[in-house]
Amino acid sequence: MGDTTFRGWPHHLPDPVSEAALVVDERGILTGWSLGARNLLGYRAEEVVGRPVAELFAPGGPGPPRADAYTAAQGGPAVLRHRDGGEIRTVLWAQPWSPGDGRPHWLLQATREMSVRRQDIGRALLDGLGLASPVALSVYDDQYRCLMQNAALRRLSGIPDEERLGLTLSETASQVDTSGMEATQHQVLRQGVAVADVEVQGRVPSDPGREHVWSNSVFPLKNRLGEVFAVCHAVLDITERHRARERLAVLNDASARIGSTLDLLHTAQELADVAVPRLADFACVDLIDSVFEGEEPPTGAVARETVFRRAAHQSIMPGTPEAVADVEDVDVHASAPDSPFARALATGTSVLESVNGPGPLPGWLADDPKRAEGIKRWGIHSWMVVPVRARGSTLGVAVFLRRERTDPFEQDDLLLADEIVARAAVCVDNARRYTRERGTALALQRSLLPQRLPVQAAVEARSRYLPAGSRLGVGGDWFDVIPLSGARVALVVGDVVGHGMKAAVTMGRLRTAVRTLADLDLPPDELLAHVDDQVRRLVDEQAAEGPESGDATGATGAASEPAIDAYAFGATCVYAVYDPITRHLTFARAGHPPPAVLTPGGRAEFLDSANGPPLGVGGLPFEATEAELPDNSLLVFYTDGLVESRDHDIDAGLDRLRRALDDGCRDLSLDAVCDTAVSRLIPGHPSDDVALLVARTRALSDDRCAAWDLPAEPEIVARARDHVARQLARWQLGHLVATTQVVVTELLTNAIVHARSPIQLRLVRNQSLICEVSDSSAAAPHLRRAGRMDEGGRGLFLIAQLTQRWGTRYSGDRKTIWAEQPLNGPRR
């Protein structure tokens, strides 16, 4: 069922069928009766002609007055009586009429009161649409020629009727591409279906300097037969609505894109990318130099001599030719007091400026010739300078320029720029704070790592440490090279779970624990067992102290950050000891990837061994694995960040490491091996911290070690002193004979007293002279101060005074006491 609300408005005008026409003579007698009168009142002509017209008026209603009372243009009200007795409210018009018989008559026309009202509304509607409507209307015939336009279209286009009527769209709207609208006209004329809300952009003579957006709707006009004979265009200027929608879209885009990382330059670049080209033709972000280092920005007005550095820029032109500084270069802003930069930084509020026409540039550009030349060259006519402020501090300025778009920036554009920069400023400040905190954590972590690897004869070692390039922050990877007694060396690599300052501190604590236990010369499996016990004890103590210091929830129920000790739980570690005399490598793992070895003439492989649980987990013992390595073998220790990433699992990473080592690393220097492994396995910023320790074994030749098995008898002391004297003479260390004989005498005497046969005496010429005595006693010697009357207790005291260092280590059921002397002579 069709909508009948406007049926009869206003195109159905009175006609003989729907309106009543009556003729009366001067006496008031009906002499004529129309078909419309029959339809309105129900009487046939023969029933009323010749009767007084007064009989047609309802009793009690107005009339029947004189006919000349209805001669006014608006007629007069009359209540007529239907043949069935009903009353019909009408409007009656009267006019003199002469039928040609010489006698005066009146022609009366009666229309239902409701119909007249609808016709009045229709005429008012037409007048309103033509004169007062804000919607621009025009009508085009089936030949696409304009038939009419209303006043709104005249104001909008500035084209009078004589220049539009009879012409097509393309002949009158040269500033707008009309091909689409003419195609729409053709579609509506052919199909008879309206096309609504088609957006059109362009300029009009009444406002040539501004781009406008219109909503254009085209609907068909039909004749009485329902045939489309014309189309009507309804055009509404939606420029402000369109721009508001664009601004909202830019804000939504800024919220989604800015701050995706905690990288300062990347965040600034995201701001510039959001602004171009949707807001500006060029945008740049300059930050105060100290912000790049994570330092606190100034809270008050920024001094004119403050150094700014370019953080990001973007342009609609490739290569950003408008830029006066490259990224990370210093950008010298115009410092004149009236420059927009100085005003924005002094007041903390944004500044908008435009240049009207080709006139002279603003005076503040006099002290900024480079920028002035760029403004002239690229035709920059409008700019906004917005301070980048967050948490009450000024971080820098964002500058937006227009050159291609002829519309200058408006206040609404400035509000949009303020909102975008305000959102970005918080992200920039977060990145600054992260830079500072990450730098502090990185400095702490590097201070906890070896500053340089110790020089020793067992291996030549090099290392690399790469902090994670993500927002996770500094991790807890570490490595160490620890000289041990007997010319041996310990190689350690570990990885603490988590990232940040506390992870770095935990790493330092574990590294200290490992070094302390290494001084006891414990086997690798025993050392890891002791570290595991310590980690579990620390975690248990932390849990017993309550949630405020642990990783549970606090009193408020919110999750708090785990305490330092909690980070140690689940840490992984590999601890290896290499003996250059026996050429044996002994190692144990606590949840850590296996070390790789590349032997001379062989291929890279991973040393197979049992992998114990991560530290603090417990439940399984740690097992030591021993392997004999040829001299000049390459050992590679690493953390999982080197071989595992989001793109591949650890097995694929291990295979890549194996291939990288096989691909020519055998003949490379250790630094080159490190660089090759890193570049082949980590092409970009690592997603996790990476620690890499590479060592090349250097076995001691047989002529640098001498050993004697001796019975536990007192008379062998003199024989041992002779062996020592002859061996030191062969090594051209005669200046150490006296002190070494004293050391040997005390060590052997102690072994004879407290141990059983066999006793072994060994001398090693390394970077120092090492003297070792091994026996089967489990009793550990202790340095003590002997009393004046004591007969013993002075041996270890003498050894401590004559040697550089001494100690005890255990292996199986045997104990070894060792002492080292510098090759250049005894201690003074």
Image: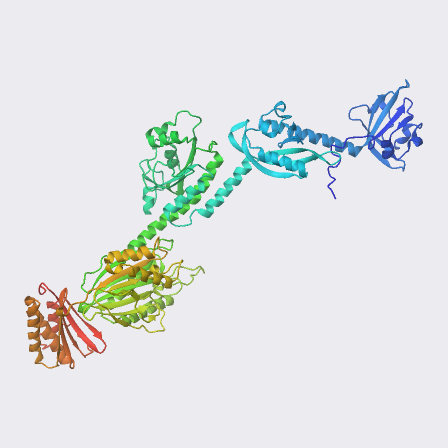
Q: Is residue 118 visible?
A: yes
| Foreground residue among 267 and 68 | 267
Q: Which residue lies furthest to the top in this view?
A: 102
Q: Is residue 240 above or below residue 672?
A: above
User: Where's residue 372, x and y in %?
Assistant: 36, 30
| Foreground residue among 395 and 377 | 377
Name which quarter of the figure residue 286 lies in: top left
Instruction: Please give left or right for residue 731 compared with residue 426 in the image.
Output: left
Q: Residue furthest front?
A: 601
Q: In this view, does 548 lie above or below 207?
A: below
User: Where's residue 54, x and y in %?
Assistant: 90, 28
| Foreground residue among 514 and 610 | 610
Q: Which colour scheme is used?
A: rainbow
User: Where's residue 116, x and y in %?
Assistant: 77, 31
Q: Is residue 390 visible?
A: no
Residue at 39 percent of width and 36 percent of height: 344
Quadrant of the image containing the N terminus: top right
Name which quarter of the figure residue 735 lies in: bottom left
Instruction: Please give left or right for residue 587 compared with residue 434 in the image.
Output: left
User: Where's residue 775, x and y in %?
Assistant: 17, 78
Quadrant of the image containing the C terminus: bottom left
How many dots with numbers? 0
| Foreground residue among 408 and 404 | 404
Name which quarter of the figure residue 169 lies in: top right
